[in-house]
Image: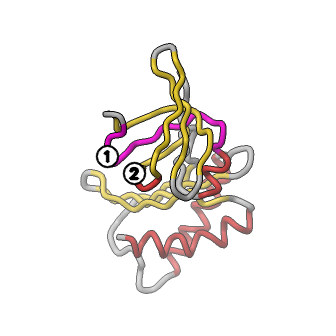
């Protein structure tokens, strides 16, 4: 259903740009019997519920005005903040996350592990360097970016 994601991205971008909001991600997926269209937005200092409602209302109006309907099945529209564990997808996300505590899930194990949490030390197009803690010692690991299934900010406990 990538065409739905592309269509929604195209429709929501001008609404967000007008408000100086950032599009974090658009998802269209089926959970159980229901379809969900999720639009994650953010801005400097965080997004609030009224701003999410504003975007939801304007996006809904745009979607309703298109004929034929770009999403013919019934679905739930959710516009929200990405939350404290915001995904890292774009270069700007990684740039903002430098020095921050992040979680990385890998396609293939690295040193026997497929998940790591640590402080993002550096990154480039090919790899990123995490400072992780193993019991009482710290160690830097280098992760091939092609091996990253998902990356997000994490909350350190």
Label 1 CA crowd tier, 10 Å (few <14, some 14–19, many 20+)? some
Residue drawn 59% across the image and 63% down it = 57
Image position of 106 with respect to 28: above or below: above
Left or right? Give the position of 140 relative to 99. left
Image position of 103 with respect to 3: above or below: above
Left or right? Give the position of 59 relative to 134. right
Residue drawn 53% across the image and 32% down it = 140
Question: Magenta residues, as a range?
Answer: 97-110
Residue 127 percent coordinates (x, y): 51, 51
Q: How many labels, in total?
A: 2
| Tag 2 secondary structure | helix
Residue at label 2? 147
Label whose residue precedes the other's in the sequence (1 or 2): 1
Label 2 CA crowd tier, 10 Å (few <14, some 14–19, many 20+)? some
Q: Say if the magenta span includes residue 98.
A: yes
Residue 93 percent coordinates (x, y): 61, 52
Q: Say if the magenta span includes residue 106.
A: yes
- Do the CB atoms of the residues marked 1 and 2 lie less than 8 Å apart? yes
Q: Main secondary structure of the magenta part?
A: strand
What is the number of the mark on residue 65?
A: none
Taking depth in this image into account, of 146 and 149 the one nearest to the observer is: 146
**Marks 1 and 2, how far apart in space?**
6 Å
Residue 14 percent coordinates (x, y): 66, 72
Residue at label 1? 108
| Quarter of the rendering containing residue 99 | top right
| Tag 1 secondary structure | strand
Taking depth in this image into account, of 100 and 52 the one nearest to the observer is: 100
Image position of 144 with respect to 39: above or below: above
Residue drawn 59% across the image and 54% down it = 124
Residue drawn 70% across the image and 52% down it = 43
């Amino acid at each position: 259903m990538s065409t739905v994601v592309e269509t929604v991205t195209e429709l929501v971008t001008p609404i967000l740009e007008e408000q100086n909001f950032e599009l974090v991600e658009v998802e269209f997926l089926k959970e159980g019997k229901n379809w969900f269209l999720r639009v994650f937005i953010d801005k400097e200092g965080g997004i609030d519920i009224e701003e999410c409602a504003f975007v939801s209302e304007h996006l809904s109006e745009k979607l309703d005005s298109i004929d034929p309907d770009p999403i013919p099945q019934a679905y739930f529209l959710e516009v929200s903040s990405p939350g404290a564990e915001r995904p890292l997808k774009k270069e700007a996300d990684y740039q903002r996350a430098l020095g921050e505590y992040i979680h990385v899930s890998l396609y293939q194990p690295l040193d026997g592990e497929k998940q790591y949490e640590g402080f993002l030390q550096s990154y480039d197009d090919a790899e990123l360097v995490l400072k992780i803690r193993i019991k009482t010692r710290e160690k830097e690991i280098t992760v091939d970016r092609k091996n990253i299934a998902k990356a997000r900010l994490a909350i350190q406990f």
